[in-house]
Every structure is written in structure tokens, then in C-alpha cells.
Image: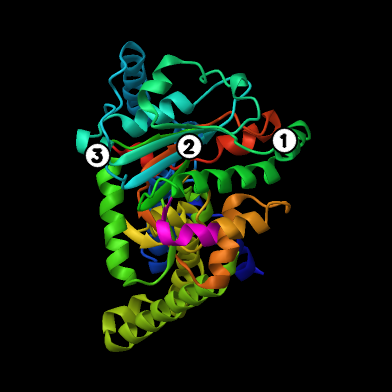
Amino acid sequence: MKAVIYEIGACNNPRRFDDRQKSSTHTLLHSTNFWIISCYLIFYFTAYQYCRHAYSRDPTSFFFDPTKGYQKVYSLKRESQADAFIAAANRSTTTKPGSQPRPMPTVCLGIATIARSEQQYIRRTIGSLLEGLTDAQRNSVHLAVFFAQTDPYQHPIYDEPWLKSVADDIVLYKLKDEEMAHLRLLEENHQFWNKSMYDYEYLLRSCLNTGAQWIMIVEDDVLAKEGWYSQAINALQDIQERMNEQDWLYLRLFYTEKLFGWNSEEWAHYLGWSTLAFLVTSLTLGVSRSYSLRLRKHLSNLSIAIICCFCLPATILLYFMAGRVSMQPPPLGLHRMEKFGCCSQGLIFPRQIVPRAMDTIHHATNKRFYVDMTLERWANAEGLARFALVPPLLQHVGSKSSKGSKFDEGANSIWNFAFENYT
């Protein structure tokens, strides 16, 4: 009985309890597992905050901030330069090369435009494409502006004086009465898919008739990078050398990185690399411990489990959260781009492929497809190579869709984020 009372008294002794608490704290602070977890949490918090700041403009990232990502930076500069060019063209009739006979153009630059409900982007599109060109470059470009409306007078810029001073050709429909009636019906019924296919083929044919070596078709709501012409021509020459007279479809001048994320089609690839990281880490720790007395003392099986089953998965998760464009950015320069290359804002075709492209589009006119979808399906079936420049030479700025207000949300998201890094 005395022994029991003595033990109870010892447990209730504050001094002895405090000694045991200090001993437990001392043991915890000297625990390898405690320091592994503590150091990793500090690292993870720091890395997380860095990712929030560094990858806020990556649309494939968990940390993407639309207010930063869609902010115009370089585009503002190009808009200002384009506006100045158009203003100068309005004051002068000598912007376009003179009426002297011109050599066969190197590039036919075709732009199809229709009136939008609120804002017309075509002025800045043309201004940015022509601004900064040397006289020799301008002389090698045939600018064809196609008013893709049965009544061109409905377009606000049709009668503006600057247009006639910069355009080499103002393209209008020249069709039989029954064909014009069909196009009016497509316009009235808002059959954008069918109409856009018809117009694309029509503009391709118009450009083909100029004899130009390269057929460049751009939409009427883009901005061009300063110096785009020389970069595009150099890339086209590079493609010709690479392909060695084999057929290829186009050089893409615009794409959006939103489609470059961690695509579900590649899940096995991601799983394989993650599994490999787990195996390498666990084997490295296990082998290192077997050769080191110090590691055998401090690195227990539980420590390895914490690293491999907690720290490593959390790091892999953060890697994926950071975004594919940030973690695996496409290398700069000219590359093949057969997948995820949206959309048709700007494409350059070699002359020899255009008749086949026109035929493909013609046979799909009555289907509910867009031009780029039609061309991609055909290219996949034929095994035709497609190329793109990284970063692109064009930016899409049309927040008001030509198809109507219900398409505006989709139009807003068609954006290249790397374009804004130009200076």
C-alpha cells in the first residue's frame, strides 16, 4: 500500500512531470523524422508562394490569374503603331507602292472581314501587318482585303479612304445570282460554319490567282509582331529545306497555349515518370543507408517512407500544379505542330498545296466544321506536316466575335500568352 501511494505521489510531482516533458521535447527536436517534415513544409510553403507569383500567366497552371494572363503588354505597343500607320494612310495616298508594274508577289496576304456589331479590328490588323515593312518587303506582298458580305457597304471600313491607299486588291463576291442568293440565305440563317468555309476557299482562290509563292490567310482580328515578315520568310525557307520537296500543309502564325496542358491522352506517360521518380528516390535512399553508418543511425524505414510517400508525391503534385507550359515550355524557334494547334487566325500555305486544300474545304462546306478542323482532319489522314513558330508572330485580339455576341466568351479566351513577352 505504501509503495502504491509513493508511486502516485511521484507522478503528481510537478518537477518530475516537467523533467519528463523536457525529455520528450528534446527527443522530438532531435528526431530525424521531425526535421524531415519541418524542413519539407518550409520548402513547400516557399515553393508554393513562388509558383503563385511566377506562373500566374500560365493558362495551364493551377495558379493562373486571368487578370494578369490576359493583360495586354506588347499588344498595346503594336496597337499604337498600327493606329499611327492607318492615320498616316488616311492623310496620304502614297502608302501603297506606286502604279508602276510590280513583279509577281512572293506572298499573297489575304484577309477576310465582315462587319462586327460593336468594334472593327481590321484597321489594326492591316496596320500592324504593314507597319515596319521595308519598301522591298512591301513590294513583295500582295494585300487582298476580302469583304465577305453580300453587301460590302454594310462594313464600316469599306468606304474609308485609307483602305484604297494600302490594299492591292479589294475582293468582292463575283458570283451568279443563284450563288449570291445562297450566300444571303446563309447570312440570314447565321450559318457561320458553312459561310466561313465558303469564304476561306474563295479567298484562297483569289490569292492563288496572283501567282504568289506563299498564300498567307489571316483573320481580321489579329495583331502582327514587328518584323514578322522576315521571320516568316526565313521559317518558310527552313521548312522547304527540311521537307526536301515533300508536301506539307502550313506554317502556323498563331496558337494558344491553353491546349498545351497536361492532356489526359498522355496519362500513362505522366504515371510512368512519377513511378520512376518514386523508385529512384526509394532505391537511392535505401542503398545510401546500407553504405553509411551515419545514415543507418538516423534514416529509419519510417523516414524513407515519409520522404517517398509524403514529400515526393506532394512535390510531384506541385510540379503538375505549376503548369506544363512553365515546367516543359516548348523550345523557341520553328517546330512541327501536329497536335493542339488552335486555331485559324494565321496560316501560310505553300502554293503547291493550295488546290488540294481548296478541294478539301469545298467538299466539307455543307458540314458543321470549322476551317481549321477540316484542314487538321485532312492533314492527319494524308500525313501532311504542319509547322509553327514559337513564340508566334500573331496575337488574337478580337474580344467581339464575328459570329455574334453568344460567341464572345470563346473569342476572349483565344489568346497567346507568350506573345505579350515581346519587347
Question: Where in the figure is residue 258, as x and y percent of width and height?
Answer: 52, 49
Q: Give the vertical position of 337 relative to 216 (above or below).
A: below
Q: How is the image coloured?
A: rainbow
Question: Where in the figure is residue 68, as x and y percent of width and height?
Answer: 45, 33
The disc, 3 or 1, on the residue closer to the chain's N-terminal end is: 3
Q: Give the vertical position of 223 relative to 291 (above or below).
A: above
Residue 177's mark? 1
Decide: few, some or many residues near mark 3? Use Cα within 10 Å; few <14, some 14-19, many ≥20.
some
Residue 73 is at least partly visible in this image: no
**Residue segment shown in magenta:** 348-357
Residue that appears at 44% across and 59% down = 319
Front-most of residues 388 and 370: 370
Q: Nearer the viewer, mark 3 or mark 1?
A: 1
Decide: few, some or many residues near mark 2? Use Cα within 10 Å; few <14, some 14-19, many ≥20.
many
Residue that appears at 75% across and 35% down = 181
**Residue hosting label 3:** 137
Residue that appears at 36% across and 21% down = 165
Residue 111's mark? 2
Q: Give the vertical position of 236 relative to 86 (above or below).
A: below
335 lies left or right of 155: left
220 lies left or right of 178: left
Residue that appears at 70% across and 46% down = 194
Which residue type does callout 3 highlight?
Answer: Gln
